[in-house]
Structure formats: structure tokens, C-alpha cells
Image (tube, helix red, strand yellow):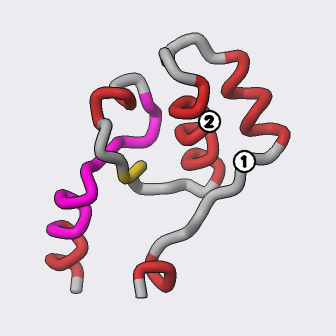
Amino acid sequence: MLLDFLEIANANHKAVKHALLRNDFNDFEDCLQDECAKQIFADYIITRNISDFLTSEIPAISPSDFLEEWKNVQ
């Protein structure tokens, strides 16, 4: 049911290249998630480690906060 509502982003050449050039993240994989989220115009990055995404261009939200917000949309 969630996959009817969520979109899974792919890491393509452009996203990897941009992530490698950025220096505002401590972790490459987190940066790559931000790049992928930007490519699909995501509203959020859903993560248990919000503190890892303080410099993210796409806001990070915890799974529980996302589910709470999703319930309010239904």
C-alpha cells in the first residue's frame, strides 16, 4: 500500500557525480540520498537519522512523524 503512495528513487550517474562534488555531508550515502530525492522532487527523506540530514536540500522526517502526517492526509 505504501508503494502506491511513495516513489523509490534511483541513483543514476548524475546523482552520484553531484554527491561526489558536494562537501556539505559527512557521509557520501546520505548525500546521495539527498541528490536522488532532489531528482524526483521528493517532499521528504524518511530516515531514523535526521541529524545526518541537517544540510540536506530535501527535509528529513522520521518514519513515525511521516506516518502521523500521512494519517492526517487520508
Number of callouts in the render?
Answer: 2
Indicate whether residue 7 is drawn in magenta: no
Asked if the residues shown at circle 1 and circle 2 are in contact, with their CB atoms under 8 angstroms apart, the answer is yes
Query: Residue 45: which numbered mark, if any?
Result: none
Q: Which residues are magenta?
A: 56-68
Residue at the image position 56 percent from the left and 41 percent from the top = 33
Question: CA gap, disc 1 to disc 2?
Answer: 7 Å
Residue at the image position 27 percent from the left and 58 percent from the top = 63
Residue at the image position 46 percent from the left and 34 percent from the top = 57
Q: Reply above or below: 1 against 18.
A: below
Position of residue 6 measured from the top left corner of the image (x, y, whole percent): 48, 72
| Three-letter code, disc 1 | Ala
> Dot 2, crowdedness within 10 Å: few (<14), some or many (≥20)?
many
**Quadrant of the rendering where the C terminus is positioned:** bottom left
Q: Reply above or below: 61 against 23.
A: below
Q: For residue 67, what is the image quadrant?
A: bottom left
Q: Nearer the viewer, residue 56 or 33?
A: 33
Position of residue 39 measured from the top left corner of the image (x, y, whole percent): 65, 49
- As drawn, is 64 to the left or to the right of 11? left
Secondary structure of the residue carrying tag 1 is loop
**Disc 1 target residue:** 11
**Disc 2 target residue:** 32
First in sequence: mark 1 vs mark 2 = 1
Q: For residue 15, what is the image quadrant?
A: top right
Residue at the image position 63 percent from the left and 58 percent from the top = 9
Position of residue 50 measured from the top left corner of the image (x, y, whole percent): 29, 36
- As drawn, is 54 to the left or to the right of 62? right
